[in-house]
Image (cartoon, helix red, strand yellow):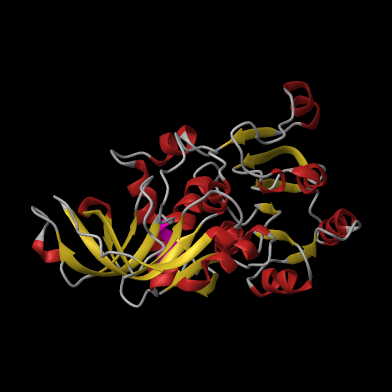
């Protein structure tokens, strides 16, 4: 089979397209003929040699990637034979191997692909979608919700915009550059602004004032940095700041979000929560919280409530996909297709 391999940590160009031996499924495992593989910002950090939230960096050489969709084409010992030939999607967990024509995973990680759901869309929902649903567990979205989404053209941001609009709420979405701003507007945001425009907060306030809205009620923040600092000023008393990332600062073991201290929160009348990791798992509930979120995400996609935006690259162009993701040259979820 063909796969993308990393032999040395470093730049995107270190990802190479190679012919490697077909993997064989072990006990309780299946092999998937991959139709789509997800690319995550964390993948770019790992490729660079940054451990980030992982317990350790993978041994080299490695095949990156942890989200795949395709057809089960082989079974390991003790795997349920009914999976053979089925269209499936799976998150591989902390085990890499997704950037390939064939990938192996435990059968208990599989979800049967909902009818008419594109494999690339399914890949987006199994990772990015489950995170978006996990974030949304921390707030109740109603027609009175006024949401600020600083990375509204990204994979998670696209879904947050759709969810709030589906509930009848109001969305101000931020993105970088005219093309991304147009995508945010086309996705249904009530106001789409370029965060590179120094006047965007004034335009947001004018929009709210014109509609008789005193302030935003929730800030979905996966960015951090200057955009977050300015967006916080648009939240009114009783507002909610949900922190799920800090892409403006990069991913590393010793970096994290810039959070307001207790005195500043009290002065502003805000509530601020970091929602990834254990807090999200507790909110998701169930014996397997991640699977709970995956099922919810796939259900939302199957019912048409959420439709992920995907940016497709051929598998052999994984290096280009990483470079585009790192330089903010993508819109939505980045997906590789063999």
Name the image quarter holding residue 153.
Answer: bottom right
Q: In front: 103, or 115?
A: 103
- Magenta stretch? 122-126
Q: Position of residue 184 (x, y in %)?
A: 68, 68
Who's the residue at 40% across and 70% down the image?
36
Q: Is residue 84 in sight in this rendering?
A: yes
Q: In front: 148, or 179?
A: 179
Q: Main secondary structure of the magenta part?
A: helix
Q: Position of residue 132 (x, y in %)?
A: 51, 53
Q: Is residue 167 in sight in this rendering?
A: no
Who's the residue at 36% across and 42% down the image?
289
Q: In front: 170, or 162?
A: 162
Left or right of 321, for residue 20: left
Q: Quadrant of the C terminus?
A: bottom left
Left or right of 250, for residue 280: left
Q: Quadrant of the N terminus?
A: bottom left
Q: Position of residue 242 (x, y in %)?
A: 62, 41
**Residue 274 lies within the magenta run:** no
Left or right of 19, for residue 214: right
**Residue 124 lies within the magenta run:** yes
Left or right of 102, for residue 169: right
Q: Position of residue 154 (x, y in %)?
A: 62, 61
């Amino acid at each position: 089979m063909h796969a993308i391999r990393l032999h040395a940590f470093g730049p995107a160009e270190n990802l190479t397209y190679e012919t490697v031996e077909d993997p064989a499924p072990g006990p309780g495992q299946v092999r998937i003929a991959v139709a789509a593989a997800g690319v995550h910002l964390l993948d770019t950090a790992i490729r660079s040699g940054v451990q980030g939230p992982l317990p350790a960096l993978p041994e080299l050489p490695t095949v990156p990637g942890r989200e795949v969709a395709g057809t089960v084409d082989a079974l390991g010992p003790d795997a349920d034979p009914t999976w053979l030939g089925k269209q499936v999607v799976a998150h591989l967990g902390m085990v890499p191997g997704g950037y390939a024509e064939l990938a192996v995973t435990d059968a208990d990680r599989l979800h049967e692909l909902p009818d008419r759901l594109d494999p690339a869309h399914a890949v987006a929902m199994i990772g990015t979608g489950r995170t978006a649903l996990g974030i949304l567990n921390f707030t109740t979205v109603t027609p009175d919700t006024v949401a600020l989404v600083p990375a509204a053209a990204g994979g998670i941001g696209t879904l947050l915009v759709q969810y709030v609009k589906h509930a009848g709420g109001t969305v101000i979405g931020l993105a970088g550059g005219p093309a991304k701003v147009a995508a945010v507007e086309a996705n249904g945001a009530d106001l789409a602004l370029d965060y590179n425009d120094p006047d965007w907060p004034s335009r947001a306030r004018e929009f709210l004032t014109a509609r008789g809205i005193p302030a935003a009620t929730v800030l979905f923040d996966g960015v951090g940095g200057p955009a977050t600092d300015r967006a916080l000023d648009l939240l009114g008393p009783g507002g909610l700041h949900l922190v799920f990332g800090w892409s403006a600062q990069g991913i590393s073991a010793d970096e994290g979000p810039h959070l307001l201290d207790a005195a500043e929160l009290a002065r502003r009348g805000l509530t601020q929560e970091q929602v990834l990791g254990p807090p999200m798992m507790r909110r998701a509930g169930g014996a397997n919280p991640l699977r709970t979120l995956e099922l919810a995400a796939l259900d939302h996609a199957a019912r048409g409530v959420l439709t992920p935006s995907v940016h497709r690259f051929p598998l052999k162009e994984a290096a280009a996909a990483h470079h585009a993701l790192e330089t903010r040259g993508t819109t939505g979820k980045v997906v590789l297709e063999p």
